[in-house]
Amino acid sequence: MVTHTAQSAPINFSETELIQVAENYPHMRVLAGHVLFDEGSPSSTAYIVLEGELEVLKRAEDRQVLLGVVGKGELIGEMSLLQDRPRTATMRARTNTLLIEVDGQQFKDVLTTCPAVSYGVLETVIARMGSNELRMRQNNAMEHWNELTAGVAHELNNPSAAIKRGVDQLAEALDLFTRAQRALGLFHYSPDQQQMLDELYVQIRERAQHPPELDAMALSDREYEIESFLQDFGIEESWEFSESLVNLRISIDDLDLLTDFFTPEQLRPGLVLISAMYKTYGLLAEISAGAAQISGIVDTLKGYSYLDQAPVQEVDVTDGIDKTLLILRQRILPTLSVRREYTPDLPRIQAYGRELNQVWTNIINNAIQALNGEGEIVIRARRDDQPNWVAVEIEDNGPGIAPEHLPKLFDPFFTTKPPGKGTGLGLNVS
């Protein structure tokens, strides 16, 4: 639903003043859909609406947010003239509209000669700044949570895919396990043979969770050695389980010992069962690791948002920074390094935990954008001079901030980013 926020404080022209303004300044007509001016464009003119309606639009990433609608008797474009800044929003005609054009000098003359206009401008500026800031704060929060959701979804994708892949393969491994058990049941093993197999079974679970770290060439060489040995012994198609035997760290010496006690017909189903057990335990370990990773992500997200916790509480500042970095991990490219310098044993502080994490997010996000994917961010946390205070410094080796922009950094809607790439509220909110 669109609210006419810009109409909350219209300028109260008297009939005489309105006629005077209308007679002394040029008029212009625009058709519905016409863009009067774009966000970020230079400001040189203010306008008074005589007929029709205009939409106030603000770019946010790849879309435009409707801030409000202005109508008859309202002044637009005055904020940029007063502050000598580029346009902070786009103005587009909603209907066919008749406007009065007032350039910069004429606008100053009107303020000087028309007290009602001066008072009305003051009211309008205050009302618009408040309503626009509220709307953009809400949009900024939504953009933040959208970005957060996208990051979490990306983080969840890998473990959830691993779990699904493991479950799909587990059915096949269990089927192989069942068939191998049936094949073993056809043989009557001696106590010594059964003991040797049982000793191997005991080692499988532990070894399946910690396979050896071999490169592809070494793994292939080991598999070939085992396949050749078993083929010479009389076991065909040993490639079906040779990889599992390598990962279980079963050596040629181990197999040589087994061949002293088993015939090829007896040994093959035992090796198939060992391979099936390895695959089953290995897949269970993958599924368990994926579930643990998802649980860790959820715990991080809950800690970041302080879910189910009181608004004000004792906060571990560095823990909040670390959780923020985890949430933003998707945006921190390999060519961008983050160095943390934390003084040990920092005190916990009384703070709004969720809002404080939003501050870290805003500032670190700014640093990431300033570095454009390459550089270093340094985050320092130390004790402040006052007891139980913590000072946090976030620094990057990007291009820096122009001296003329420094006084405006905390002004609402001020941004050095291109239109649509920043709301100008990050530091103001922080």
Image: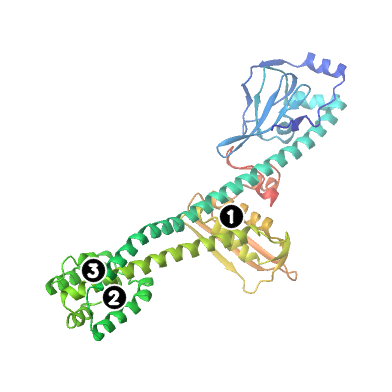
**How far across and down, in percent of the image, does residue 328 sit?**
54, 55
Mark 2 or mark 1: name the one nearer the start of the chain. 2
The quarter of the picture where the N terminus appears is top right
* Numbered marks: total: 3
- The three-letter code of the residue at mark 2 reads Arg
Type of amino acid under label 1: Ile
Local packing at callout 1 (Cα closer than 10 Å; few below 14, some 14-19, many 20+) is many
Q: How far apart are marks 3 and 1 (CA)?
A: 50 Å
Q: Circle 3 is placed at which residue position?
A: 242
x then y, percent, for residue 245: 26, 72
For label 3, the SS is helix
**Marker disc for residue 249:** 2
Does residue 408 lie above or below 169 as drawn?
Answer: above
Which of discs 3 and 1 lies nearer the camera? The answer is 3
Q: How far apart are marks 2 and 1 (CA)?
A: 46 Å
On the question of residue 9 being in view, the answer is: yes
* Left or right: 282 in relation to 342: left
Distance of label 2 from label 3 (alpha carbons): 11 Å
Asked which secondary structure carries label 2, the reply is: loop
On screen, residue 375 above or below 121: below
Between marks 2 and 3 in the image, the one whose residue lies nearer the viewer: 3
Q: Is residue 86 left or right of residue 157?
A: right
Residue labelled with disc 1: 364
Q: Position of residue 67 (x, y in %)?
A: 68, 34
The kind of residue on which mark 3 rests is Ser
Label whose residue precedes the other's in the sequence (3 or 1): 3
Between 121 and 241, the one nearer to me in the picture: 241
Which image quadrant for residue 122? top right
Does residue 370 appear anywhere in the picture? no
